[in-house]
Image: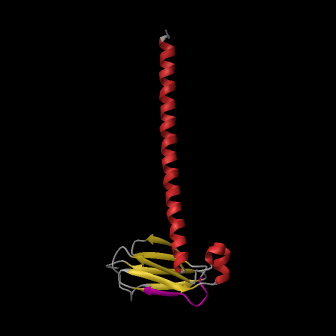
Amino acid sequence: MLEPNERRFLRELMRRMLRDFERMERELEETMREFAEMERLLEERQREAAEGSAAPLYTVIDKDRELLLIFDVPEAEEGTLEITLLEDRIIVEGKVDKRKIERALGRASRKVERVRGEYVLPFPIDPQRAKVEKRGSKVYVRVPKQGY
C-alpha cells in the first residue's frame, strides 16, 4: 500500500504526463496541418506547370484607406508583364524568362511558358482610381477603399 505522499506524487506525475501528451498531440496535429497545406501548394504548382503557367506569389496589406497588393514575379520576362484591373479582381500575366524559371523549378519548369494569376478582391473597386507601380521583380497595386 502507498503512503499518502507517494499517492499525491504519483497523481501529480500522471497529470504532468497527461499535459505533456496533450501538448505533443496538439503540436503533431499542427504539423500535420502544415504538411497538408504544403502538399496542397505542391499539387497546385504541379497543376500550374502542367497547364503551362506559374502563379506569382503575392501579399495583401489592408491599410486604413487602401488595399496594397504586392506581386512578386521574378520569373517574368522583363517588359511582358501586364496588369488588368477589373471591378472584382486583378489579373497578372506575362511571359516567363526560361533561364530564371528553370533555376527556380528545375526540370518541372519545361512546360511553363507564362506567369498568370487571377486574384479576387474583397470588395468592388474603381479600376480608374487604382495605381500600379512596377519596381524590379515586384508589382505594387494600390486600391483605394470605398469613400476615400
Q: In the picture shown, does residue 21 fall above or below 30?
A: above
Q: Nearer the viewer, residue 41 or 63?
A: 41
Visible residue check, residue 56:
no
Figure quadrant of residue 78 = bottom right
What's the residue at 66%, 77% (across, down)? Answer: 102
Residue 69 visible in the picture? yes
Residue 141: x and y, percent? 47, 81
Q: Residue furthest left?
A: 147
Image quarter where the C terminus lies is: bottom left
Decide which of 145, 98 is in the foreground and name it. 98
Q: Which residue is drawn at the image coordinates 65% and 83% (left, top)? A: 98
Tell me: residue 71, above or below residue 13: below
Q: Tell which of 142 and 117 is nearer to you.
A: 117
- Report the number of numbered marks: 0
| 25 on left or right of 88 | right
Q: Is residue 103 left or right of residue 143?
A: right
Which residue is outermost to the top? 1
Most prominent secondary structure in the magenta stretch? loop
| Residue 83 in magenta stretch | yes
Q: How is the protein colored in the picture?
A: secondary structure
Q: Nearer the viewer, residue 51 or 86?
A: 51
Q: Which residues are magenta?
A: 76-84
Residue 100: percent from left, percent from top: 66, 79
Magenta span includes 1: no
From the top left corner, tell me how far across and down residue 66 is, in percent.
41, 76
Q: Is residue 148 above or below residue 10?
A: below
